[in-house]
Every structure is written in structure tokens, then in C-alpha cells.
Image (cartoon, rainbow, N blue to C red):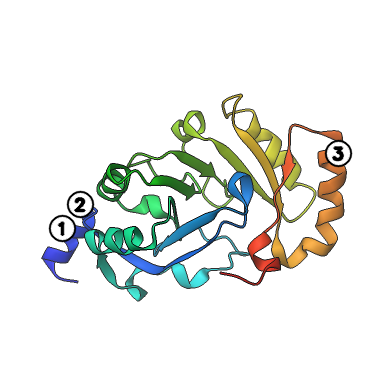
């Protein structure tokens, strides 16, 4: 990577893009809604159950002009863009979110919260990970807390994070996909007894779409 690319990356004018596509949001509060997914390469959080490990190394993914990305999004006429990863907050999100909002496109963020927030978003989904805990200042900005459940101890982890978010934050428990058959009944029982929580299923996987 030459110096010009480094400067553009630092300024958020280019981003390492693993993939981008028009699809249906499959998780959380906006599940079932048409959305344009922009998956940014780069992540050092290291979740062992991550289903997009190929996103971890940013050097594997081309640096693409944000202006080009935005033009591609506009051509789809989609109303919502989901910026996900990887961990997108490893990079400066100010430029891309500003440009998208200027086009009256809703901008959603999916993050572990392990890096400082940059950019402006209409909706922030925090999915905390045990390997790199969220920074404290993300909680007050979180619109949706989505905790992945792979064992019974994860419920304590979820409740701990619930105590930090604002009262209006939507609360979701999502079964880790490879253990969904065994852990989903446990989640159902927990949510039945704790109705402030809602179950999130990876509906896109059931529908066999990206």
C-alpha cells in the first residue's frame, strides 16, 4: 500500500471492502427490510464462532473509493445501508456516512463497540464480544443491543450489558448459528421469563440469501 492510499484510508476516502450487496436484513429490529450491506474488511476482535473470518485481514480486500461505493448504492434506489464487518469502526466512517445522509439514505451500523465511534448513524446495533469489550461511551448511543448466545453463561453477559444501555434500547438475544438447535430452547425459556428481551434469528440463513 503506497502513501497516498494510506492517507486516503486514514481519511475514510477509500475503504477495504470485502463485499457489498442488496439483500434483506436478517437480524434484529429491522429484520425483513430491504437493505444494502457494505461489509468492511478488517477485524481483530477474534470471535471463534465468526461466520465471516475472511473479513479479518483488511489486506485481502481491495481499497475502493467511497464516492464509487455511494454511486453504486444510489443506483439500487435502496433506502437503508448497513455498514458492517469485520469491525467497521477500525476505519474513519465520517466521510461515507456524511455523504450517504446527504442523499437521504438511512445509515445503520453493526459494531462490537471495541473501537471509538466515528461518523453519524441513524441506528447503531451493538453486539458486544468477550474477546474485546466495548468502550464505555458506545452504550449511551446504542439503539439495539444484540447479544450472541452460545451457552448458558452468555445470559449473564447479556444482562450485564443491558444495565449499561439507555432505556429505549431494543434488546435481542440471538443463538449462535452452529448451536442454534440446542441453545434456542434455552433462549426461548429465558425470554419467556424476561420479556424485555426479544429473540433475533438469522432469518437470511433460513431464507438462503446473503
- Residue at 14% over, 70% down: 2
Q: Tell me how far mark 2 sits from mark 3, CA to CA.
A: 46 Å
Query: In screen coordinates, is 79 left or right of 72?
Result: right
Image quadrant for the N terminus?
A: bottom left
Q: Which residue is mark 2?
A: 11
Q: Viewed as shown, does residue 181 lie left or right of 102?
A: right
Q: Nearer the viewer, mark 3 or mark 1?
A: 3
Which residue corresponds to the image point at 61% horizontal and 57% vertical from the top-left? 26
Label 3, secondary structure: give it. helix
Point out residue 28 in the picture as x, y percentages from the top left corner. 63, 48
Q: Decide which of 98, 173 is in the foreground and name it.
A: 98
Could you tell which of marks 2 and 3 lies nearer the N-terminus?
2
Residue located beneath label 3 in the image:
192
Q: Name the residue carrying label 1.
A: 7
The answer to whether marks 2 and 3 mark residues whose Cβ atoms lie closer than 8 Å is: no
Is the residue under label 1 in contact with that under label 2 (CB below 8 Å)? yes
Q: Residues within 10 Å of mark 1 (few under 14, many from 20)?
A: few
For the residues labelled 2 and 1, the Cα–Cα distance comes to 6 Å
Amino acid at each position: 500500500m503506497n502513501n497516498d492510499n494510506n492517507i486516503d484510508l486514514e481519511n475514510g476516502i477509500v475503504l477495504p471492502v470485502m463485499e457489498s450487496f442488496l439483500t434483506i436484513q436478517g437480524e434484529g429490529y429491522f429484520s425483513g427490510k430491504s437493505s444494502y450491506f457494505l461489509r468492511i474488511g478488517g477485524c481483530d476482535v477474534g470471535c471463534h464462532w465468526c461466520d465471516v473470518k475472511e473479513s479479518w485481514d483488511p489486506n485481502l480486500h481491495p481499497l475502493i473509493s467511497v464516492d464509487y461505493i455511494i454511486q453504486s448504492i444510489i443506483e439500487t434506489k435502496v433506502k437503508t445501508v448497513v455498514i458492517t464487518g469485520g469491525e467497521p469502526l477500525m476505519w474513519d466512517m465520517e466521510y461515507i456516512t456524511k455523504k450517504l445522509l446527504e442523499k437521504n439514505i438511512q445509515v445503520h451500523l453493526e459494531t462490537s463497540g471495541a473501537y471509538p465511534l466515528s461518523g453519524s448513524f441513524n441506528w447503531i446495533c451493538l453486539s458486544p464480544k468477550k474477546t474485546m469489550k466495548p468502550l464505555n461511551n458506545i452504550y449511551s448511543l446504542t439503539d439495539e443491543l444484540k447479544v450472541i448466545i452460545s451457552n448458558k453463561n452468555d445470559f449473564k453477559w447479556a444482562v450485564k450489558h443491558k444495565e449499561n444501555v439507555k432505556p429505549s434500547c431494543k434488546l435481542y438475544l440471538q443463538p449462535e448459528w452452529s448451536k442454534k438447535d440446542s441453545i434456542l430452547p434455552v433462549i426461548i425459556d429465558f425470554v419467556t421469563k424476561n420479556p424485555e428481551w426479544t429473540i433475533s434469528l438469522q432469518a437470511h440463513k433460513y431464507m438462503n440469501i446473503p
